Amino acid sequence: MTDVADVSTVRADTPGSRATARLLATAATAVGAPDLVLAVSRNGVRTVHTGGGSEPGPVPRERLAYELGSASKPYAGLLLARLVAQGRVRYEDRAADLLAPGLPVHPAVRRITLRHLLTHTSGLPGLPADFYPQAVPRWSTDPYGGYPADRVVRAFLRARPRHRPGTRWHYSNFAVSVLGHTLAAATGTPWEVLLHQRVLTPLGLTATRVRPGPEGADAVGHRRDGTPVPALDTGGFAAAGAVRATPLDLLSFLEAHLGGLEHRDPALSAALADVTRPVLRRGLRHGHTHTLTWFHHPSPYGPVLFHAGATLGQQAFLGFRPGSGLAVAATATRRVHRADTFVATAYGLLTQTP
């Protein structure tokens, strides 16, 4: 797909930033989407490339809010880590005890901790079993909106985990959604308010939210055939996939993980350090490493931490390289498909850039 809008925004006109702009412009040719943003921060110097197959609108692409899908999970993880740093909860607190103290549940459910929920080791399936009958008829339009928060909680309390908590890794939107509801119950504060109070506001992320913004403020997703997709309604699964943010705010979020908050907010600084530490290894020869919230891979230039996400019509990639000052944020308004190159392109910028 040929770009009809191709703009590079560089905050410092240096040889390094100009080289990064050329790198992003080249990378963008590998991705076809109506709207595309590739954004890089090197030690706080930002380079943003925008393009895509559609005509740009009145709001610059880098200032539109994009649906993050599963790339919302690092925000939920940082929220948990900050509440732990502040002594409000502990990683080993049992979710059922916080959600429904004294209510009879399956013994395996009783053993599920907040850490299990966040690290996908709870034994819960990816989604509740009764999610699919109501979702399948509207799979391409609104699969989550008809499954509200109270239903997610009820499904958790009557669950029968497939594996003993803490023994196996299985990616679960269900589990992270339960984490969000548990933190809300533990603090007496709705998850959305809690996220704003403890993460978004302290980090200055004023263009990040969990609901659609005013008309014209959000990017519009598209199916593979180019058909526009309605804004995502995550229903009761908000903690697992509801965050929307501009690429510039995504860079701010990633830059916070690269340091600089030690004297501003000790609890938040401690939480940011906590979520970057490897806590789990799995797979053949324990080849896959995870922190509390990030996938953790080696690269020629040191470890990289990243998370990707997709919704019905949008994609996002977030990643950074601790110790190098490099962060990469990418967004696209096109549904993922089998031959998709978006994640590979963004991942390459993170892992192959000196």
Image (cartoon, grey):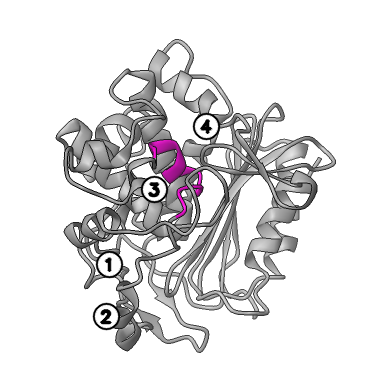
Secondary element at tag 3:
helix
Nearer the N terminus, badge 1 or badge 3?
3
Going by the numbered disc 3, the residue's amino acid type is Ala
Using the image, tell me which numbered label, if any, was put on residue 233: 1
Closer to the observer: label 4 or label 3? 3
Closer to the observer: label 1 or label 2? 2
Going by the numbered disc 1, the residue's amino acid type is Asp
The residue carrying pointer 1 sits among few (fewer than 14), some (14 to 19) or many (20 or more) residues within 10 Å by Cα, namely many
Mark 3 vs mark 2, CA separation in Å: 27 Å
Using the image, tell me which numbered label, if any, was put on residue 134: 2
Closer to the observer: label 2 or label 4? 2
Going by the numbered disc 2, the residue's amino acid type is Gln
Where residue 28 sits, quadrant-wise, is bottom right
| Residue for point 34% across, 33% down | 199
Secondary element at tag 2:
helix
| Residue for point 46% across, 69% down | 314
Residue 158 coordinates in the image, percent (x, y): 26, 58
Residue 282 is a magenta residue = no
Counting every numbered tag in the picture gives 4
Q: Nearer the viewer, residue 1 or 166?
A: 166
The answer to whether residue 186 is left or right of residue 288 is left
Nearer the N terminus, badge 1 or badge 2?
2
Extreme right residue here?
300
Q: Please identify the quadrant where the C terminus is shown.
A: top right
Where residue 291 sits, quadrant-wise, is top right
The answer to whether residue 40 is left or right of residue 271 is right
